Image (cartoon, coloured by chain):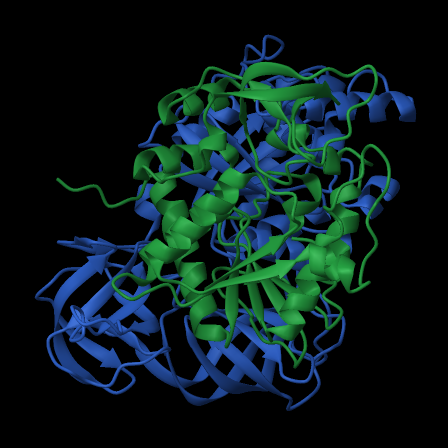
Chain colours: A blue, B green
């Protein structure tokens, strides 16, 4: 049973087709005893029907009917398991080439990324692509699993060779904390249990690494940011004077008595109290959902941001960002979008495409000005009203946005502010 | 020194509250789909915390199949009155009487899939633009791909291959007239999390979840409760057993398990040791491997 004090770790998995990603996830769930008997029964039946040897653990992660028929993963699926130390959420993202948007989606909420490499093939183009996305989305921890070690005779030299290949790739990107683990997902070596076939490997198995990654310091505790979701004004007699601002602390720490500024208006005030349910709190930190009340009665509404007076984000109408295009329809020139940044919604237009990133070669294409599905580009965006921004690198919550096409209401792009 | 991180239940709670507040801010007429089961009770509890000291700004919508456990209805009515919220009831019996749907026949007949029509009709009649549900991604494989904010077209249908990508905590709630959203604030909770949280918060749940003596018969690997709707076959026999229910649905299809867990602590310990998923006792999911996906596409919860 999971302890009440255990932390939540969200991670994403990326690998090329046939790298054994589904098998790895199945193995983690199976060896950590998160697969229930009736689920196992269903998988055993299907494995037999398809004529597989033994139980195909990969079947456990295939969700939608089309996927089961085609044997591929077409959408991000979320999986859950826990150990006494941690609860885990896996964003299981497809490795297939046209599904960059799914990897970006899965990576957006992840603390860690597992990147799978087939020991026989080493670092391939897709490895670079997955790593680039992990660095673009600023995932703090990357675990490189060199899989199928059983097919290279558990060879230490082969593992070291792949580690060097990957180090060369990672050096061109911003990946902070990289771990390397030789595994066999199929045989179970170094996934949950230490491998007897690779006694030369001194590090921890994958699950132990996931349990011990230090994630508490990943959240920005310096820059206090609080985007107002909605105003709480009870219509009851005893609380008639209550006026509080509901939201989730994006970063930093707020305490009663703090001098704050409400943006974009610039009105100054002090925090009078912090409420959560029936409790009055001494402080609130990310990612707590609370209600802030201010000493002065000023006009505050959804989309406003409450920050500390001595540490404010930049109000900007011209924003430079990396975007990933998520829609089948290419970006039409000078289209107006809705931009959703924290809880603030404005209209926006892409003014200029600075370059398009070729994520296979990691080269910048300055000529190509077409933005299509799965493209990653550096763009200049103009908004109708200022956004209160930080750079994505410093603050995931106030450095990210999505673009919504007003004609279709679809989410067409994800943006990371530079 | 203070710790500046949340434990997993606190983080899940904060995430769910954030989602519920986004609903309040983005929709005109949102409702909580309330079945009287623990997941919808949990969502209602989280909504109470999200807006306190204000009242919950949503109505509760119960899609009533008429095949209820009496305990569920008592529980619903007392919760509604203590929270001071509005209750809407969509009646499957009325949909049958109006000829909108036809009753299934045979021993395994249920009103489960009939709820889809009643729900969609109620959503249209009441001009509901968002229905908040207690579905969790860990429950069933089709639900593993569900979004927090899940778009439904003007026929109420889910298109799993054309879902809007959902990044960070930025939820796109935009929709055209006649379309609506299903929102799932406890998407990331597991059954264990739900029970752990119910225990931590000491949330009241219907007595059916606690072990109790009941007249039941053995069918499809679980104990089906005796009721006026139950057709007893020749080889079946009503016996009295000490059982409890892990999930609550219609009285006709919800199977119980033998248990002595008559306190929350014992239930949590039992769930932790359990080796079968909770929906394993729900006949509605056993019809085919993609039973849930097919119902969800049509507009099921």
Quadrant position of residue B289: top right
- How many numbered marks appear? 0
Residue B96, relative to residue A314: is it above or below? above
Residue B165, relative to residue A73: is it above or below? below
Picture coordinates of residue A207 (x, y %)? 50, 25
Query: As drawn, is B225 to the left or to the right of B44?
Result: right
Residue at the image point whose x is 35% and y is 62% from the top: B84
Picture coordinates of residue B210 (x, y %)? 45, 26
Residue projecting furthest to the left: A257
Residue B218, relative to residue A354: is it above or below? above
Query: As drawn, is A333 to the left or to the right of A302?
Result: right
Residue at the image point whose x is 32% and y is 80% from the top: A301
Work out which quarter of the rendered image holds the N terminus of chain B and state it. Answer: top left
Q: Nearer the viewer, residue A348 or B260?
A: B260
Judge whether residue A20 can be spotted in this image. Answer: no
Query: As drawn, is A280 to the left or to the right of A322?
Result: left
Residue at the image point whose x is 25% and y is 55% from the top: A277
Judge whether residue A233 can be spotted in this image. Answer: yes
Picture coordinates of residue B211 (x, y %)? 47, 21
Residue at the image point whose x is 51% and y is 73% from the top: B29
Q: Nearer the viewer, residue B86 or A340?
A: B86
Quadrant position of residue A246: bottom left
Picture coordinates of residue B78 (x, y %)? 39, 49
Q: Nearer the viewer, residue A69 or A221?
A: A69
Q: Nearer the viewer, residue B1 or B146?
A: B146
Residue projecting furthest to the front: B228
């Amino acid at each position: 049973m999971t302890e009440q004090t255990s932390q939540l770790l969200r991670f994403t998995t990326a690998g090329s087709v046939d790298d054994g990603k589904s098998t790895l996830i199945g193995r983690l769930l199976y060896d950590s005893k998160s697969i229930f008997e009736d689920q196992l029964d269903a998988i055993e039946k299907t494995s037999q029907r398809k004529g597989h040897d033994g139980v195909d653990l990969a079947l456990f992660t295939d969700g939608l009917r089309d996927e089961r028929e085609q044997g591929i993963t077409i959408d991000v699926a979320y999986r859950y398991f826990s150990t006494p130390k941690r609860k885990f959420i896996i964003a299981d993202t497809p490795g297939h080439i046209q599904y960059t948007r799914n990897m970006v989606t899965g990576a957006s909420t992840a603390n860690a990324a597992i990147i799978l490499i087939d020991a026989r093939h080493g670092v391939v183009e897709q490895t670079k692509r997955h790593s680039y996305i992990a660095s673009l989305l600023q995932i703090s921890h990357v675990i490189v699993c060199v899989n199928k070690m059983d097919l290279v005779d558990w060879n230490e030299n082969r593992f070291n060779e792949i580690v060097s290949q990957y180090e060369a790739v990672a050096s061109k990107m911003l990946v902070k904390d990289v771990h390397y683990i030789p595994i066999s997902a199929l045989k179970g070596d170094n996934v949950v249990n230490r491998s007897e076939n690779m006694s030369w490997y001194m590090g921890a198995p994958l699950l132990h690494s996931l349990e011990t990654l230090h994630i508490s310091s990943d959240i920005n505790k310096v820059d206090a940011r609080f985007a107002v979701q909605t105003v709480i004004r009870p219509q009851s007699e005893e609380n008639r004077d209550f006026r509080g601002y509901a939201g989730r602390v994006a970063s930093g720490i707020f305490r009663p008595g703090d001098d704050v500024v409400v943006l974009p208006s610039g009105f100054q005030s002090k925090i009078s109290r912090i409420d959560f349910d029936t409790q009055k709190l001494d402080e609130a930190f990310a990612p707590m959902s609370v209600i802030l009340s201010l000493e002065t009665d000023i006009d505050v509404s959804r989309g406003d941001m409450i920050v500390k007076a001595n540490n404010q984000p930049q109000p900007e109408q011209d924003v430079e960002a990396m975007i990933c295009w998520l829609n089948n329809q290419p970006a039409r020139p000078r289209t107006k979008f809705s931009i959703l940044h924290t809880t603030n919604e404005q209209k926006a237009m892409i003014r200029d495409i600075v370059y398009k990133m070729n994520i296979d070669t990691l080269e910048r294409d300055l000529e190509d000005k077409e933005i299509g599905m799965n493209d990653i580009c550096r763009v200049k965006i103009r908004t109708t009203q200022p956004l209160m921004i930080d750079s994505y690198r410093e603050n995931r919550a106030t450095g990210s946005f999505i673009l919504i096409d007003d004609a279709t209401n679809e989410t067409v792009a994800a943006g990371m502010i530079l | 020194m203070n710790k500046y991180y949340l434990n997993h239940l606190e983080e899940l709670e904060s995430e769910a509250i954030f989602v519920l507040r986004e609903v309040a801010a983005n929709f005109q007429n949102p409702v909580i789909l309330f079945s009287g089961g623990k997941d919808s009770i949990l969502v209602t509890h989280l909504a109470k915390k999200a807006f306190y000291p204000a009242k919950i700004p949503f109505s509760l919508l119960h899609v009533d199949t008429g095949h209820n456990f009496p305990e569920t209805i008592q529980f619903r009515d007392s919760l509604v009155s203590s929270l001071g919220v509005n209750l809407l009831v969509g009646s499957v019996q009325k949909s049958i009487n109006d000829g909108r749907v036809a009753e299934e026949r045979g021993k395994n007949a249920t009103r489960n899939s009939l709820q889809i029509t009643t729900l969609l009709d109620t959503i249209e009649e009441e001009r509901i633009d968002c229905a908040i549900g207690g579905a969790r991604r860990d429950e069933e494989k089709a639900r593993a791909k569900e979004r927090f904010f899940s778009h439904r077209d003007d026929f109420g249908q889910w298109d799993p291959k054309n879902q809007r990508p959902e990044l960070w905590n930025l939820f796109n709630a935009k929709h055209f007239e006649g379309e609506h959203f299903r929102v799932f604030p406890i998407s990331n909770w597991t059954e264990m999390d739900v029970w752990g949280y119910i225990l931590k918060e000491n949330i009241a749940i219907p007595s059916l979840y606690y072990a109790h003596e009941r007249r039941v018969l053995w069918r499809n690997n679980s104990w089906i409760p005796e009721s006026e709707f139950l057709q007893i076959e020749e080889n079946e026999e009503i016996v009295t057993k000490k059982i409890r229910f892990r999930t609550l649905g219609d009285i006709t299809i919800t199977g119980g398990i033998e248990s002595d867990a008559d306190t929350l602590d014992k239930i949590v310990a039992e769930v932790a040791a359990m080796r079968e998923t909770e929906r394993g006792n729900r006949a509605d999911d056993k019809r085919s491997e993609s039973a849930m996906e097919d119902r969800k596409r049509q507009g099921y919860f």
